[in-house]
Every structure is written in C-alpha cells, then in structure tokens.
Amino acid sequence: MRSAIQRSQRGAALLTAMIIVALVATLASAMVWQQWRAVQVEAAERGRLQSAWLITGALDWARLMLRGHVRAAGPTALNGAWAVPLAEARLSTFLAADKNNTDGGPDAFLSGNINDVQARYNLRGLYDPQTQKVDPNQLAALRRLFQTINLAPAMADAIAEGLRDAQVPPGTPGAPSAPPLMPEQLDQLVWLGIDEAAVRQMAPYVVLLPAPTPVNVNTASKEVLAAVLAIGLGDAQRLVQHRQRNAFNSIAEVEAQLSGPKLSPQAQTLLLVGKSTFFEVRGRLRLDDRVLEESSVLERRGNDFVTVSRKRESSRESTR
C-alpha cells in the first residue's frame, strides 16, 4: 500500500516538474521571440532613419548644382551641368577618408537626376483668378497637346472646368454648390474625374505647379513646343535640333528657325527664353535590400532653392 502511494507521489512530482519545465520553456521562447522582434523593429527603424538622411544628400547635391546654374550666364538648357544625372555610386567611397576602412558598414548606393519641370505644360495657367475665367489661349494649347499625344481634346476642357470650379470664389455667379478639391499634384486630377490611365499618359508632358509658368523652349519636348507655339511637329523638331548645338537666347532666334510666320503675341507669353524657376529632383537610395525613392520640386527664390513639394516611396529590392 505504502509503495503504491510513493509511486503515485513520484508520478505526480514528475508530472509537476514536466509542467514547470514546459512552462519555463514557453516563457523563455516568448521572451526570445519578443527580443528578436524588438531587434528587428529597431533595425528597420534605424534603416529608415539612415535612408531618410542619406536620400537628403541627393537634394543637397541638386541645390548645389542649381545654385551654380543660377550664377552662370545663359538660359536653362539641357547642355548645362545641372542636367547631367548622378550615376549610382557607393556612398562609402566618398565619405570615408581611408578607403581601406569602408568595409563593415551598410552598402548604400545613391543616384539621382534633375529635371526642368518648365519643360512641361503647366495646368496652373488654365484658370485666371483675376478674371475668374478660363484662359482661352492656354486651353487651346492644351487641346493641341492632347491631340498630339493621342488624348481626347475634350479632356482639356474637363480639366479647365474642374480647376475653375475648384478655385472660383463661393457666391460667384455660376460657381458650383459643391466644388471639387483643388489638386496640388498631377495624380490628383482624378478628383476632377480624369481617368488614371489618362493621367499617366499625359504625365511626361504636363505638370501642376504652385504658380503659372511659361514653357522653356530650351528644355521642352517637340510635342509641348508644337502645342504651345501652335506650330507643326516638323518646326518643333527643328527647334529641338537647333538647341542641341546652341541654346536659344531670344524670341527672334526661335522665330528664325520656323518655316511659317512669326510667333503671335499669345504664343510668346507662353514661352520662356531664360532661366527656369521650378525644377524636379529625383533621388534613389539603395541600402542593403531596401530602396528609397524621393521626388522633390524646388522653386528658385533669388539665388537659393526652396522645396515646395516632396514625395517619398520605399520598397524592397528582389535578390533574385
């Protein structure tokens, strides 16, 4: 009887010990997982902060190049130093004084480029807040552009009406009772009922800046030049070929390359022969398997450049 009780007690003790061991193992596993998770979160946050600081280098590089462009003589043209892209380069080779000590840190590669956004037609000029009307010259230019790039010209009217409805003061005769939101970026044209596919198609040719701007004859594409100047694509191509050799410095030089009559006063108001005010800076940082891309719009104010918009996207690069 006593031996049976002892065996029962030993069995209960063994079961209790096993339960305690299992509980301790479970708690230890949970602690290890939480610690691993905390390390992963900290590493991700550190990588995010590192990427954010490093991508700013592309913006600083762009400001440096553009300040030099402002000080230099001549108009904004594609043969300037600012237009040369920054090829992807490993940052450690530039930051380390001793190149033998560059190992051990993260592999960070930075690249970028600067674009003159005044090479594109600016939708901001469609509506004139002073007259509270759509500018017919601007609308005609946009209709011609859409026709050239195989978009319905009527879409230009829809964009102009949407921008007018978004900006017309309340109480104005003809003002909508429920005006749409005013788009600040091109992809927000969907707020005006424009299809996303159409927005992507027009993106290389149009832009939405904070203020109306003319089109730079020395950087614009032939499609934009043909639309703004109301000329044929042949004449527009001639302008593009000429500026590859010599940048235009006056309206007279532009007119000398045209086969038709001189430019109308309306067309001249839409054309810039000089230094642009707005530039787009695109930077791409590759840090280990993380990729951070940033697009910023800079506005020239005096001899300096101020960031007016900034958009950032992150992703992971495939290792395959």
Image (cartoon, grey):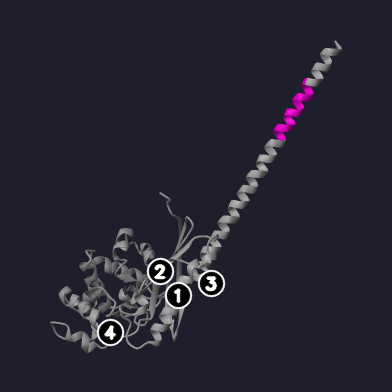
Q: Position of residue 52 (x, y in %)?
A: 52, 65
Which numbered mark, 3 or 2, is in the foreground of this view?
A: 3
First in residue order: circle 4 vs circle 2: 2
Which numbered mark, 1 or 3, is in the foreground of this view?
A: 3
- Asked if marks 1 and 2 touch (Cβ < 8 Å), the reply is yes
Q: CA distance from mark 3 to mark 2?
A: 23 Å
Which numbered mark, 3 or 4, is in the foreground of this view?
A: 3
Amino acid at pointer 3: Ala
Circle 2: element type? strand
* Residue lying farthest to the left in this orientation: 259
Amino acid at pointer 4: Thr
Residue underneath mark 2: 112
Label number found at residue 269: 4
> Which region shows up in magenta?
11-23
How many residues crowd around disc 4 within 10 Å: few (fewer than 14), some, or many (20 or more)? some
Q: Nearer the viewer, residue 67 or 161?
A: 67
Residue underneath mark 1: 61
